[in-house]
Image (tube, grey):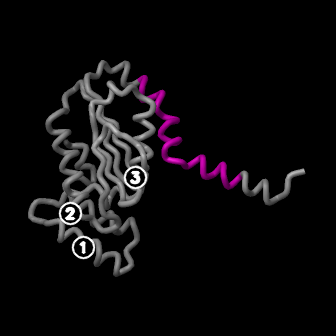
Amino acid sequence: MRSLRDIANEIFLEAIRAVDPYESVKKQLLRIRDIFGRGGYNNFFVISFGKAAHPMASSVEDFFPHELITGGVVITKYGYVIEDRRSRLSLYEAGHPLPDERGLLATEEVLELLRGAVDPKTFILCLISGGGSSLFISPMDGLTLGDKKKTTELLMMAGADIYELNTVRKHISKVKGGRFAEY
């Protein structure tokens, strides 16, 4: 007979597996492959940002043939990159919870990729996880990275929760509040 401890441990491990970002994305990839196949797409780009960005993008890279993925960008928090892993995507580590220059550069690469590569036959898979609002940054015209960083810092010091932070962030960003979809 199994002990309560063994049963609890099994439940805990199954809960961890259920929310694993690699596996969560993997479960959706057959459907994504079908959509891609029916659409007659010429290009396939992967954009992934957030603390789970790298394992999510890795799941896509492991599933699709090497030559099918045209390119893409992954933006994750410093220290969250899966070691010993080759990627066909540009990989950036950036600041979280305070945005930094690396996040700004990575976001600009995403926007340049979209400006130059998007047509009706381009398929873009965008994977977003927690932390994405800090890592994917593009200040509104007239604002600087320093302005965004200071705003985030002040809000955090005042005790703002993530919903309050994101409410302000979307008003000072070119890519939040639905504006990213306009690219």
- Check if mark 1's residue and mark 2's residue have beta carbons within 8 Å: yes
In the image, 7: left or right of 52?
right
- CA gap between label 2 and label 3 equals 28 Å
Whether residue 109 appears in magenta in the rendering, the answer is no
Dot 1: what SS? helix
Q: Position of residue 91 (x, y in %)?
A: 30, 47
Q: From the image, tell me which residue sits under label 1.
A: 151
Q: Quadrant of the C terminus?
A: top left
Q: Quadrant of residue 77?
A: bottom left
Mostly what secondary structure, the magenta segment? helix
Q: Amino acid at mark 3?
A: Val
The range drawn in magenta is: 11-34
The image position of residue 157, as x and y in percent, is 34, 80
Label 3: which residue? 81
For label 2, the residue is: 172
Q: Earlier in the sequence, mark 3 or mark 1?
A: 3
Tell me what residue is drawn at x 73 percent, y 56 percent. 9
Q: Residues within 10 Å of mark 3 (few under 14, many from 20)?
A: some
The mark that comes first in sequence, 1 or 2, is 1
Q: Amino acid at mark 1?
A: Thr
Nearer to us in this view, 117 or 73 = 73
Q: Amino acid at mark 2?
A: Ile
Say left or right for 36 vs 114: right
> Where, by quadrant of the figure, is residue 43 drawn?
top left
Q: Residue 105 placed where, x, y %?
A: 19, 54
Q: Which one is closest to the eye, mark 1 or mark 2?
A: 1
Q: Residue at x 18, y 50 (%)?
A: 108
